[in-house]
Amino acid sequence: MTALFARRRMSRDRYDRREVLTAYLFLSPWIIGFLVFTVGAMVFSLVVSFSRYNIAVGIFRPAGLANYAALAADPKVPLALANTLYFAVLAVPLEIAFALLLAMLLNRVGPGSGFFRTVFYLPKMTPAVATASVFLLLLNGNQGAINKGLALLGIQGPQWLIDPDWIKPSIVLMTLWGVSGTMVILLAALRNVPVELHEAAALDGAGAVRRFFYVTLPMISGAVFFNVIVLTIAALQIFDQAYLLFYRDQGQAAPDASLFYAVYLFQQAFRQFDFGFASAMTWLIFVIILLIALVQVKVGNRLVYYENSDSSEERA
Amino acid sequence: MTAEVAGASAAAVSVVRVRRAGPRRPSRGVGRALRWVALIALTLLFLYPLAWLVAASLKPRGEVFDNALWPKTFRPQNYVEVWDQLPLLSWVANSLYIAVLAAVLVALTSSLVAFGFAFFRFPGRNVLFGLVLTTMMLPGAVTLVPQYLIWNQLGLVGTSVPLWGANLFGSAFYIFLQRQFYLGLPRELFDAARMDGLGPFGLFRRIAMPLSIPSFVIVLLFEFQASWNNLQASLIYLNGGSASGYTVPLGIASAMSKYSPTNGGHGDYQYVMVAALLVTLPMLVLFAFGQRYFVEGIATQARKG
């Protein structure tokens, strides 16, 4: 965190006035953006959450706790929260496990790994609309390729997009197809595990499984932990896939099991134009995500192994 | 990562560095065969949806869903007719305009801010940089409605400005990325240039910018992709206007509905497939040329403070 030059020109606690002014000039875009689009926007939405604010009808007046009371009374809010949490609990571990499997395969391949890495990365480059329009048909319960494939193995596939129990696994499947971002980070971490540690463990008689749990996993725990946090925050905001599959048409009768928090928030704000309610929803999910992230950091700091304590840069 | 590894092992024996950086040696026997089988199976699984998309885009109406990877009836006319069926050209033009503007703006402003953090000494630097890192983790769902309220107050909802306007103010992850890069530049260069009388802005433009082209490209590619794929913002700010004002994701989403029989369509999904494929191609080209930048950029994410 040291500046490039300033150190040797002046004593520790005196600043050059012109340098300070120039610095803030360079920083000014971010400072303005932060004040307006982050702090300003959040404060404004806090005010709105205590108001009746409906753009369609043109109303903006104080409403006390009415929006929060409506939030507590609305059965769709706990439904959306439960759907979202269930999805996150299902998706995140599977994404980590699958990405780790891909990364470990790539790590052991040697020459040719570049080709496979490219193949695994392609879905990440595919726009969500393209992915959704393909998976909408692949996941079709009667004619879809996935169930046709399962039938070849003698398995009767579910009605992926209709059966409430299979809606979240369907979206998880789409997410797994695009898991390569996580894979790239884990692969970089795997390549940093010293070979000597594996050799020493092997000499001591540890098999592949024990080496994985006692050498590999601790050594990459920092990267895994980072991905868990990022993927959790992403899963809690799941929107695109659910919207494209179930909420594209306003007349579409979407199954309850597909009502995720971000989707309901979107409906309240941009279909009902009830921004008071939507702002209250915003603050609720903000607090929930913050709490979940804090718990993860607390737990993570106990489980993660940091190679050298001075490399605070590597702490997620 | 490379710099850190090199630094950490500078004191160690050079053999350690070489073996640490490279992939593990492939082992022999059954395990190796199993790995290759798994890799090839996974490759087929990963490529299947894309192959399916290519095949479906070449089929006539009734055969789109037949799952044949080799169409029974080839219908390349789909690729001609799609331009009449859907205002695809306008969607691509809109998305291109927004994505280029968004990428260039955010790369420039993030570089400026990053240079401010990397180069100068001023009170509150660590606190402000801490704030940058905090906003990096701020979920988009949290700022979605608040930012809409701002754009609405400014009377810009319904225009494309909200889709790139916030990029005038830099973006936390890119600021972090550029700052890391600047801190890795040799300071002797800056010292020498300063002796030659270059001011702060000159140092930024003449020394820092040209030397940071790799990280600048990472920012451009990431933001272009993010903007090209951004469905939610288009839905919020452009939906309801005329279809020719849509972006690529919003347009294709609307096309998925347009052909659905429940909306009075005839199930001409082959056009959706053509459109989906055509808007994926620019991303694949981008990736073909910039793969190492994408990989480098993603690996940087895991190293943020």
Image (cartoon, rainbow, N blue to C red):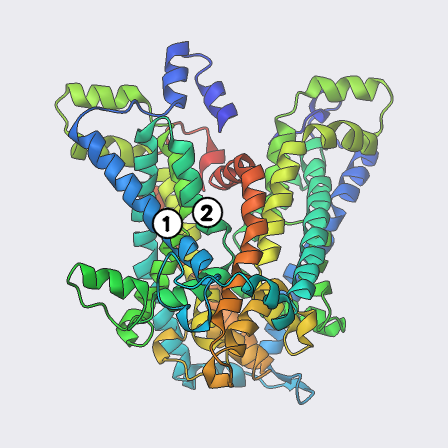
Q: How many marks?
A: 2
Q: Which amino acid lies under the numbered mark 2 shown in the image of this protein?
A: Leu
B128 up-or-down from A60: above or below: above
Which residue appears farthest toward the front when viewing the image? B73
Which residue appears farthest toward the left when viewing the image? A205
Q: Which mark is residue B46?
A: 1
Q: Which image quadrant for residue A210? A: top left
Q: Residue at x 71, y 72 (%)?
A: B157
B176 up-or-down from A291: above or below: above
Q: Secondary structure at mark 1?
A: helix
Q: Which mark is residue A122?
A: 2
Q: Is residue B260 visible?
A: yes
- For mark 2, does the 10 Å Cα neighbourhood hold few (<14), some (14 to 19), or many (20 or more) residues? many
A189 up-or-down from B22: above or below: below
Q: Which image quadrant for residue B179? A: top right
Chain for numbered disc 2? A
Q: CA distance from mark 2 to mark 1?
A: 8 Å
Tell me whether circle 2 and circle 1 mark residues in contact (CB < 8 Å). Answer: yes
Residue B113 in the image: state x and y as whole percent: 71, 42
